[in-house]
Image: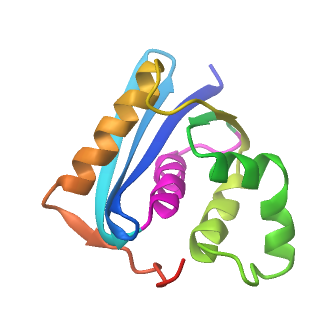
């Protein structure tokens, strides 16, 4: 089996504020859930960090990955090719450049496709990711989002 399915979501209590991400990875019959909360971050950073954290878990390269997310920001940036132009231009003037650079390095190791899903709707796994992300944002084990720049 070579197809990995990942669902992701990010949340922020205030924007900026405490935030969190959640991800659910499906590989055949195996399912893994991950989440983490951060102090002083944004929703878009958490949306992207969910994808990064999920892909970082992988121990193999050259996988076919489909990521389902309710973040049009993440989907459009990758699927419309904006990210690759941003990278060529050194991410000049782009928000979350630190995270986009991290994601791009991971992206190059796999074949990744993004699919937008409607948030807070009837998608079981997107809803589960939302639960994970909001619980992480509200939790007590909040990390510092060291890459956050005020105004992003």
User: Which quarter of the picture shows residue 91?
Assistant: bottom right
Question: Does residue 112 lie above or below 150 as drawn?
Answer: above
Q: Is residue 43 left or right of residue 97?
A: left
Question: Does residue 38 lie above or below 65 as drawn?
Answer: below
Question: Does residue 101 lie above or below 127 as drawn?
Answer: below
Residue at the image point whose x is 61% and y is 36% from the top: 67
Question: Does residue 126 lie above or below 57 as drawn?
Answer: above
Magenta residue span: 42-62
Residue at the image point whose x is 48% and y is 25% from the top: 26
Q: Position of residue 58 (x, y in %)?
A: 52, 45
User: Which quarter of the picture shows residue 32?
Assistant: top left
Q: Quadrant of the C terminus?
A: bottom right
**Colour convention:** rainbow
Residue at the image point whose x is 63% and y is 60% from the top: 103
Residue at far front of view: 14
Q: Position of residue 80 (x, y in %)?
A: 84, 49
Magenta span includes 78:
no
């Amino acid at each position: 089996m070579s197809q990995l399915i990942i669902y992701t979501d990010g949340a922020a209590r205030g924007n900026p504020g405490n935030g969190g991400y959640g991800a659910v990875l499906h590989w055949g019959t195996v399912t893994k859930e991950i989440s983490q909360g951060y102090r002083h971050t944004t929703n878009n950073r958490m949306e992207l960090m969910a994808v990064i954290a999920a892909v970082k878990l992988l121990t193999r390269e050259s996988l076919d990955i489909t990521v389902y997310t309710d973040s049009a920001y993440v989907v459009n940036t990758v699927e419309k090719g904006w990210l690759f132009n941003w990278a060529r231009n050194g991410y000049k003037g782009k928000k979350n450049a630190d995270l986009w650079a991290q994601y791009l390095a991971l992206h190059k190791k796999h074949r990744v496709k993004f699919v937008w899903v409607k948030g807070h709707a009837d998608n079981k796994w997107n809803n589960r990711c939302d639960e994970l992300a909001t619980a992480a944002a509200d939790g007590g084990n909040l990390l510092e989002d060291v890459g956050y720049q005020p105004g992003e």
